[in-house]
Image (spheres, rainbow, N blue to C red):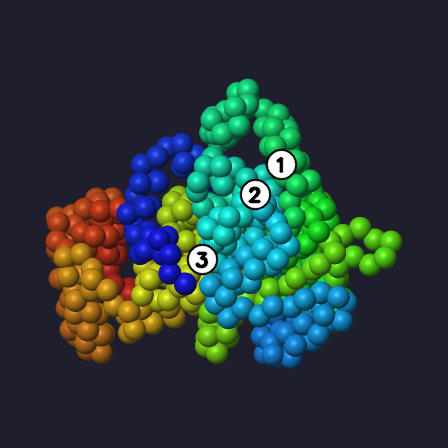
């Protein structure tokens, strides 16, 4: 799927520099990610066997991906057995058509929405508006972002980039409320506005945190209660489900529930966990109709790639974003699309095409923290390195001042020298001699020549050691 937002993924460096120059944004991202990260650390430390939980979750996700055709068929069969309707969408366009069609048949002029990254992925809101249907985000963060006309800045905390002052000003402009920076009062203003939407809307739309193949159950996790309201009050409920969200059995849900809340926000368990299995039955609350839209949109192609299929294990907790030193500095919008941070640098090239997001795999320090905090142990640094190679092979793009050609030439020279110890040793001595003009206290702050100057434009370069390893080894061997 192409959209006006796609091209921004290749502008991450320009977008990132703008954020680095905004002290307000810097503080908003720093404080929010640090809070979520430290809460996760505290919550995880309280769980005996947390590593075993991570390993079990990874095994379950591997089981799903290895037999996805079987589990999809089982899930669809169980949804329909319990009165639900399953729709298959190969592309974002098909999914938009399905949802707008359901809303039109239901006579819904307004739709209340839960926070769902899949609806952002398929550009659902603009499609509903073109069909004459007004979508209303009901998650507080998403509601704020919708009013401001922006994309979510974070998978879990959509309005992370906005301060209380920003939200107050936004509410004054949009809803003519009294200015206040008290969080409880801001929440009350949003609640009053949204409550009437719940009562009027003919259709409620949600995503799915998990979908249980064994029972046909859609599992929704939240802290605000809005999802429980919008899946119960409207006459029709539609769940948008990426096909990777399946888990095999209901008993397996306990593993993921123990991991998701702790990894995302540092909670032992989120406030509300809803298990929805079909429309309402006699004597129950709930919608008269329940529709489940199973979305591919590039996921099957990723599944076919044995190296990249691990990306589909992601449970969208956002832990890798909170720990990533790059995301902490430049935030979510710099990544240019729905998914940001380390996992976004994998997802966006897969779903949007490598050419449209060729810069994202390079927007990482490869420090490995994303892998260490991932609840399903996705080896994100390894996958980013793999994608970097794929970019150079399949989607090389123009680089400033011929950098791509320079890098290739330097790598060939490096490989040639590494195979010739005498040449390498001579080059090292020459470099150590030459750096005397540049190095100060073990660091080189500025290199005048390109391409090395591209490194020192943004960081210092460690100076070469006074003696090489070979020279030191000879000295060690002498005694």
- Can see residue 272? no
In the orientation shown, which residue stands out farthest toward the right?
Answer: 283
The residue under label 1 is 194
The secondary element bearing badge 3 is classed as helix
Residue for point 58% across, 55% down: 104
Callout 2 environment at 10 Å: few (<14), some (14 to 19), or many (20+)?
A: many
Report x, y in % for residue 213: 69, 71
Task: Give the percent coordinates (x, y) of residue 442.
Answer: 26, 48
Compared with 135, 94 (above or below) is below
> Sequence order check: which comes first, mark 2 or mark 1?
2
Which mark identifies residue 344?
3
Task: Tell which of 455 and 75 is nearer to you.
Answer: 75
Q: Residue furthest top?
A: 178
Residue corresponding to mark 2: 136
Which image quadrant: the N terminus?
Answer: bottom left
Is 348 on the left-hand or right-hand side of 467? right
> What residue is shown at x 37% (from left), y 60% (from top)?
2
Name the element at disc 1: helix
Marks 2 and 1 in Cβ contact (< 8 Å)? yes
Q: What residue is rendered at 32% in x and 59% in y?
A: 359
- Which is more toward the observer, 296 or 135? 135
């Amino acid at each position: 799927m192409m959209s006006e937002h796609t091209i921004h993924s290749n502008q991450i460096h320009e977008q990132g520099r703008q954020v680095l120059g905004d002290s307000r944004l810097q503080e908003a991202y720093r404080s929010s990610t640090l809070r979520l990260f430290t809460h996760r650390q505290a919550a995880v430390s309280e769980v005996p066997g947390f590593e075993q939980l991570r390993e079990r979750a990874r095994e379950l996700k591997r089981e799903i991906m290895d037999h996805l055709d079987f589990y999809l068929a089982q899930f669809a069969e169980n949804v329909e057995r319990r009165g639900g309707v399953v729709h298959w969408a190969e592309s974002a366009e098909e999914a938009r058509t399905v949802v707008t069609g359901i809303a039109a048949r239901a006579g819904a002029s307004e739709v209340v929405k839960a926070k769902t990254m899949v609806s952002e992925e398929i550009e659902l809101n603009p499609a509903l508006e073109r069909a004459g249907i007004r979508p209303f985000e009901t998650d507080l963060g998403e509601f704020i972002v919708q009013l401001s006309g922006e994309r979510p800045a974070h998978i879990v905390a959509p309005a992370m980039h906005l301060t209380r002052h920003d939200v107050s000003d936004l509410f004054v402009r949009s809803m003519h409320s009294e200015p206040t920076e008290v969080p409880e009062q801001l929440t009350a203003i949003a609640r009053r506005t949204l409550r009437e939407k719940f009562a009027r809307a003919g259709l409620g739309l949600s995503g799915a945190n998990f979908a249980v193949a064994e029972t046909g159950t859609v599992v929704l996790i939240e802290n605000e209660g809005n999802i429980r309201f919008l899946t119960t009050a409207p006459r029709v409920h539609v769940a948008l489900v990426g096909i990777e969200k399946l888990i095999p059995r209901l008993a397996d849900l306990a593993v993921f529930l123990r991991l998701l809340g702790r990894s995302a926000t540092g909670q032992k368990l989120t406030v509300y966990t809803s298990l929805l299995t079909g429309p309402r039955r006699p004597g129950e609350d709930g919608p008269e109709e329940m529709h489940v839209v199973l979305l591919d949109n590039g996921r099957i192609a990723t599944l076919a790639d044995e190296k990249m299929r691990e990306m589909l294990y992601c449970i969208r907790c956002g832990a890798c974003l909170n720990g990533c030193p790059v995301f902490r500095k430049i935030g979510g919008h710099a990544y240019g699309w729905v998914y940001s941070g380390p996992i976004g640098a994998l997802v966006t090239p897969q779903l949007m095409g490598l050419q449209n997001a060729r810069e994202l795999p390079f927007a990482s320090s490869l420090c490995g923290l994303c892998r260490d905090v991932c609840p399903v142990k996705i080896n994100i640094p390894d996958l980013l390195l793999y994608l970097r190679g794929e970019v150079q092979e399949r989607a090389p793009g123009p680089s400033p001042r011929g950098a791509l050609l320079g890098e290739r030439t330097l790598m060939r020279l490096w490989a040639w020298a590494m195979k010739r110890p005498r040449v390498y040793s001579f080059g090292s001595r020459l470099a150590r001699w030459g750096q005397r003009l540049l190095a100060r206290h073990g660091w080189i702050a500025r290199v005048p020549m390109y391409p090395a100057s591209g490194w020192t434009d943004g960081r210092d370069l460690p100076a070469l050691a006074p003696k090489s390893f070979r020279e030191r080894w000879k000295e060690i061997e002498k005694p």
